Image (tube, grey):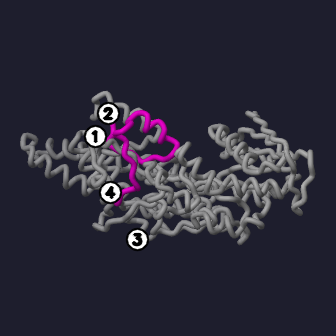
Amino acid sequence: MFDLKRLLLTGFLLTACGTSVPNQTIKLKVWGPQQEQNFLYGAAERYLAANPSFNIDFEIAAVSEVELKGFLTLDIPGGADVFSFLDDQLPGLVRAGGLARVQQFKQVVTERNIPWTVDVATFENELYAYPYTADNGVYMFYDKRYITAEEMTSLDTILEKAASLNTKINIDQMGGWGMTMWFIPENTLAWDGETQTITWNSQNGIEAAQAMMQYYATNLIIDTNALIPTLFLENNAGRLESGIIAAVSGYWQAPDITEILGEHMGTIKMPTYTNPVGETHQFGSMVGARLVGVNPFSNQPAQAHAFANWLTSEENQTIKAKELKIAPSNLASIDDPEIQQIGPIQALTAQGEFGLPQAKAVSSYFWIPADAFAKAIINEAKGIDAKVTTALNTAINAGQVDGNNPQAITLFKTEEKARQLQLSFAKIPAWLATLETSVQAVN
């Protein structure tokens, strides 16, 4: 399953004590995702060029970061010396004996990265990995031909613009992952590796869920993430009524949306929304990092840590951000003027202020009940208009509403929709109670 590349420069090996052993070659196996193989190969070349006395044979192979934990734990001693992985895998890797502690470079790693990325690289007060990115999160994409950045700051103005243009927007709940944006950071959601804490079945949580239901009840929101590129493509064909003017997504769709919208693509942090009692809230979001770990069974621990530290340094995170448009965790890289001009990175960094690190928020028990809760809210919301239509027809047939009077029909529909929403709101506390009970089953 490996796409293996090897790189060897001759020279001298620097041993842990600082002496040199001529003509001795060491091997370092490095694993990273398929889409970053060229970057890793270039990084290895730069590392050897910067250290001409090192005699290292790099073996670079493609291993998915999503599958890293499962793959590595099949044979940890036979695994890579250095590898990248998703932050929520760190506790499992530590418990499986698959990560060496970061000791020599701990202070510099802590000082140079966004604090929350250091936090997710830490387990039981020990640093076990090197922050590599801060790119796993959501933000808004929009078509600048139809909506302005100022209008994009509020979900209310976004939907008003969509309605005026007879079009829609896209906010998918992404299996429960995206649904959390309505509740965090104001409602507690925390996971310490053993105990899941969630306090959504509260007044604040209920009002957040009511807001979610109320907005989806407009039927101006599509909830299918996979359709976003296709829907933006409709705009280019002049079919705005079957397209969208804005969408919530992340780095995984940035290349496709960029290709489709080109100079018309805008990106911005998540907007605010208004709950049913009139309070304005900023959308939060889950955030995640990718980390680089060192195998505790590495035959070359000093060189493995040295390379991991260098791979995740300002130099390489800056190069990676510019080449691959991946948001860095390195504070100096974030401040680079060129990186600040990269729209998706700028939007994600701004949204990060309102983010909650996924690795410290939820256990694996969260996703199924969260997805079920999100679907219950959305399905209930989308069914309200049909109930209003049924009630209107009944009222007209009963002579309670003049079917030839548009004003009377509009008034009835407005009042009936408000009534139906209140009936649907009454279901929310029980759904939240079920959600909390289900996700706390891990406790």
405 or 118, which lies in front?
Answer: 118
Circle 3 sits on which residue? 203
C-alpha separation, residue under disc 3 versus residue under disc 2: 40 Å
Q: Are marks 4 and 3 in contact (CB under 8 Å)?
A: no
Within 10 Å of disc 3 (Cα), the crowding (few <14, some 14-19, many 20+) is: few
Cβ–Cβ under 8 Å for marks 1 and 3: no
Name the residue carrying label 2. 235
246 falls in the magenta region: yes
Mark number, residue 153: 4
Residue in the image at 32% along x and 30% along y:
236
Report helix, strand or loop for mark 2.
Answer: helix
**Nearer the viewer's eye, disc 3 or disc 2?**
2
- The Cα atoms of the two marked residues, 4 and 2, are separated by 21 Å
Residue type highlighted by circle 4: Thr
Asked whether, in this view, residue 429 is left or right of residue 47, the answer is left
The magenta region covers 243-272
For image coordinates 79% across by 60% down, the residue present is: 100
Quadrant of the rendered image containing residue 182? bottom left
Can I make out residue 43 in this image? yes
* Residue 251's disc number: none
Q: Position of residue 95 (x, y in %)?
A: 78, 60
State the image coordinates of residue 384 (x, y, percent, origin top left): 31, 48
Q: Pointers 1 and 2 in contact (CB under 8 A)?
A: yes
Q: Earlier in the sequence, mark 4 or mark 2?
A: 4
As helix, strand or loop, the secondary structure at mark 3 comes to helix
Query: Is 283 drawn above or below residue 85 in the view shown?
Result: below
- Type of amino acid under label 2: Asn
Residue, disc 1? 145
